[in-house]
Image (cartoon, rainbow, N blue to C red):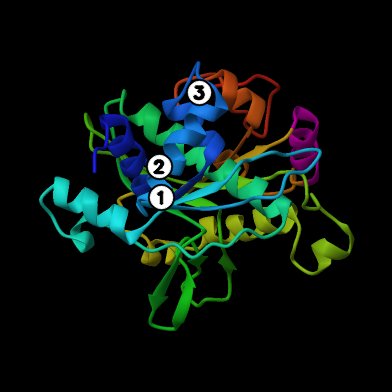
Amino acid sequence: MYLSDRDMAILAFLLKFRYCFQSQIKQAFFQGKTDQACSKVLRKLNQLRLISMEYTPRTFHHNLGNLVFLTERGGRLLAEEQKTTLFELGYRKVSCKPRSNSFLWHRKKIIDTHIQISSELEQLPINLNYLAREDERVKRTFGETVITTLFSQDHSIKITPDMVFVLESQVTQSQAVFVVEIDTGSETVGMGKKHEKGQSILDKFQRYERLLVDPYRGWKEHLPETSADGFQVLTITNSDRRIESMRSLSKHLQALAFFKFSTFDRLDAFPFFRGHSWKSFHGSDYGMLI
């Protein structure tokens, strides 16, 4: 079979990000070209059984295109090219059938964030030591759980961020841990029945605070070894108005300095790390993350 460099790059892209939406592949590899050009290449790779595609339903609000996965056959082709094994390559079969459109839109925003983080770090003197998303499970001594789940030492506090990543400066070797919450507007910010059931954004913030002030730093047990003593909570949401709602209802928290906020539109316009993209709990201006 003949595969172009772009075809192989698409397979590597799917390996790195586990799976993507067709719109994300078009943005990465077919800028300035038509949807049909992207679809034609993906159909070829699908016919060769190097990728698989799941149809996502179209709605008035969202048209995400197909959900695209790397198959084991595609993984083996990459492993052969890199003269390594499928295991060493890090290939993991994904079983993620499309569910509701709100779930798919939330998942797309998580992948968008992962892509942006990885792309920007290639240009910075910073190593990405670790990154995990909530779409993968891992076996631990007490059973199987979502890989990003953090616990207090006595397991009385549990929370599952949408993403966790650890950075290390190439200059000072200092490390920083970040957890990411993607809010697409479907969750209650605070108060009401969902808050009472522990299902609001305010409840999440309260649990993060309890982890941050835990003197035993139990949350570190489930991450690769890191010298960081705390973590920053990055919340990305739809609008400045929703940020103000979160800040207003959470102003009683003691660990306010560890929380930062941005919007999807802001991160589309400015860099994730070195752009004026993040608001703290105090003040109205956006500043840099690092």
Determine the main secondary structure of the stretch shown in magenta. Answer: helix
Q: Secondary structure at mark 3?
A: loop
Give the residue number, with chain letter if any, for mark 2. Answer: 44
Q: Residue furthest left?
A: 83
- Crowdedness of circle 2 by 10 Å Cα count: few (<14), some, many (20+)? some
> Mark 2 or 3, which is nearer the eye?
2
Three-letter code, disc 2? Lys
Question: Where residue 47 is drawn, which disc sits there?
Answer: 1
62 up-or-down from 188: above or below: above
Tell me if 191 is positioned left or right of 211 in this view: right
Which x, y percent locates residue 153? 46, 73
Q: Does residue 239 appear in this view? A: yes
Taking the spot 57% from the left edge, 46% from the top edge, the residue there is: 66
Magenta segment: 239-249
> Mark 3 or 1, which is nearer the eye?
1
- Crowdedness of circle 1 by 10 Å Cα count: few (<14), some, many (20+)? few
Instruction: State how many labels appear.
Output: 3
Give the residue number, with chain letter if any, for mark 3. Answer: 288
